Amino acid sequence: MGNLPVVTTSFVGRDSELDRIDRALQDHRLVTLSGSGGVGKSRLALQTAERVRDRYADGVWWADLSHLDDDQLLTTTVCDGVGLLDHSPRRPVAALCEWLSDRRLLLVLDCCERVVDSCRQLVTELLSAAPGLTVLATSRQPLGAEGEHAMEVSPLSAGEDGDEAVRLFHDRAAAVVPGLALDSPGDTAAVAEICRRLEGIPLAVELACAQLRDSSAQEITGRLASRLDALSDDTLWPRRHRALRTTIGWSHELCAPLERLLWARLSVFRGVIMTADAEAVCAGGPLGGEAIAPALESLAEQSVLRRTGEGYRMLDTLREYGAMWLAELAEDALFTDRHARHFAQTAVQAHAGWLGPRQVEWYRRVASTHPDLCAALEHLLAEDPEKAMEMAGCAGLFWSCCGHLHQARTYLERVLALPLSAGPHRTRALWALGITLTLQGDHEAARRVGKECEEAAHSMSFTYLMMGRPQTAHLVSDHALRLHPGDPADAPSQMRCRVIRLFALSALGRLDEAYEEATRLQRISLRFGEHWGRAYADHQLALIHLLQGRPRHAESHARAMLASKHELHDSLGIALGLDLLAGAIAAQGDGVAAARTSGTGHTYWRIIGHPHRGTPELGAIREQWELQARQAAGNTAYERAYRRASADDAERGLAHALERQLPS
């Protein structure tokens, strides 16, 4: 269980440090690895986490804080790291404390240096609330928390043939130039000299290694020696960072001019850098769009960028260097603004493309670019509030369905508090806030927002539905659909109103009408190739079949719903679907399988912070299914299967639930 990053390069040396950190984690609940940039803190933390993961029953979880420039998103970033997509209106720190309170896990907070004070406060609260929690942090300075065990990470040993830095050099050299032999006396001496002059700093060694494509080890040694010997200016970085500063600067000089320009412009990104985004943001002047893709590959070959999936990442230390040059070029304001407007346009395009065959793709796009979307919104709130309001409203649906409710509410409330005129952007932002508040269970606040935005029939009817007022929900949604007939392609909100009207019909017991509405909604969804509406049509068809005594049909529709909701990474939808699947299985007499499925559903309900939420009328129906399952399995077997599933990893439990063969 956990979410540790996947790396493709080997880990070299540091056996004694790994042993010391291992012992420290047994004796202390907060261990901080401190040290300068590039010294290998993150990689050492990752290797430690891999080594000790079997010690923690509830897994090892990783939260990357490197993209944070302030503390506004700290707690929600940590929530994302541990898999908590809290839908409640509580403060994120309260939800996180409750989530961790009965778990035994290791939480790794990577790159705390920009938010040290907030990290100290957060960790103090978490350790107090969760006795089974251990925290391993990396930071350029200790957090300063009570009970912290700080360990400074030193560079690798360097200078002799068997030393760690030399081993790292040989390992990375084999990746850079496969088949390269560095075993001659001259090469051996040169490699040892490079590592000694670079003081064993891993990032510096890797950057020097990248030059082996064009230079011999002896040539690298000579150029590096002349640079270090000539260096006397220690004003930019501390003297002890001289080797790293020199190597980064040297790598920068060895890049082609357009590659250096791209390096600087890429520093405005916060997360994974996709080629299309880099082309949209960074092109201009001498750097044409067609030159960006090959330049990205070249920077990756020189270890300035790290390949990750289909995109690239830039290490924080190298991003800082790029940002320094971007400021020197007086382009920092220009490209920060271009970055913000590009991701604002991404949100607008995602909203426009929501009802169509690219729906899943847009969900994934919004989820994967979350750090950059947040950075863009922060910039636009200060520089272009009207554009910020448009962006927040367009991102609202995706954020609420992807589980980022706290960020959605925070940004939407901030833009709506600005003295901006009424118009479609404000209407959409109000609608998005109403949906967010309803999903958090803050129904009265949602209703107030809905009244301010009378056009948002979907938001109002959704709120009434969740308040247990299906008749009112039906009246509002049905009135809106009759008032604005037409194609959902022209008004995506029509599709959402259809979903609410369908749920209201089944809640009112009008099952035959609900069945007709569900099949109609399914046909519309299939025509557009979208998943969101289709999943809720399947949910209602499963419920209707189950209530009318057709559990096999119900199971089939519940599985179809789960498949769609898994594509959308919608934890609320998955929780609802698992409840229905458990009921369908129980109605067929397999109490143990129903208990397992229900236990996995409980895990998802905990992830979103609500014990068995959904429309109110489902509560009594769930109790009937559970009673059926207990009678079929026996209380002891039911409890055993339920507890085992509810303690398991959510994704693994979902996969297990979906593996059950449908009855023939």
Image (tube, rainbow, N blue to C red):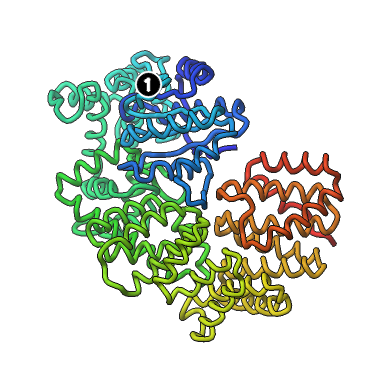
Screen quadrant of the C terminus: bottom right
Residue at image position (61%, 70%) is: 534
> In this orientation, which residue lies closer to the viewer: 418 or 304?
418
Is residue 239 rendered to the left or right of residue 586?
A: left
Is residue 370 rendered to the left or right of residue 422?
A: right
Q: Which residue is mark 1?
A: 153
- SS under mark 1: loop
Residue at image position (28%, 24%) is: 218
Is residue 627 rendered to the left or right of residue 60?
A: right
- Could you tell me residue 200's position as x and y percent? 34, 21
- Could you tell me residue 107's position as x and y percent? 50, 32
Residue at image position (73%, 52%) is: 659
CA neighbours of label 1 inside 10 A, class few (<14), some (14 to 19), many (20+): some
Q: Which quadrant would residue 167 be assigned to in this image? A: top left
Query: Does the rendering let one see residue 654?
Result: no
Amino acid carrying label 1: it is Val
Up/down of 430 relative to 567, above or below: below
- Could you tell me residue 543's position as x and y percent? 72, 66
Up/down of 598 relative to 290, above or below: above
Screen quadrant of the N terminus: top right
> In this orientation, which residue lies closer to the viewer: 561 or 271?
561
Q: How many marks?
A: 1
Residue at image position (39%, 15%) is: 161
- Could you tell me residue 56's position as x and y percent? 59, 29
Query: Does the rendering let one see residue 265?
Result: yes
Is residue 321 rendered to the left or right of residue 541?
A: left
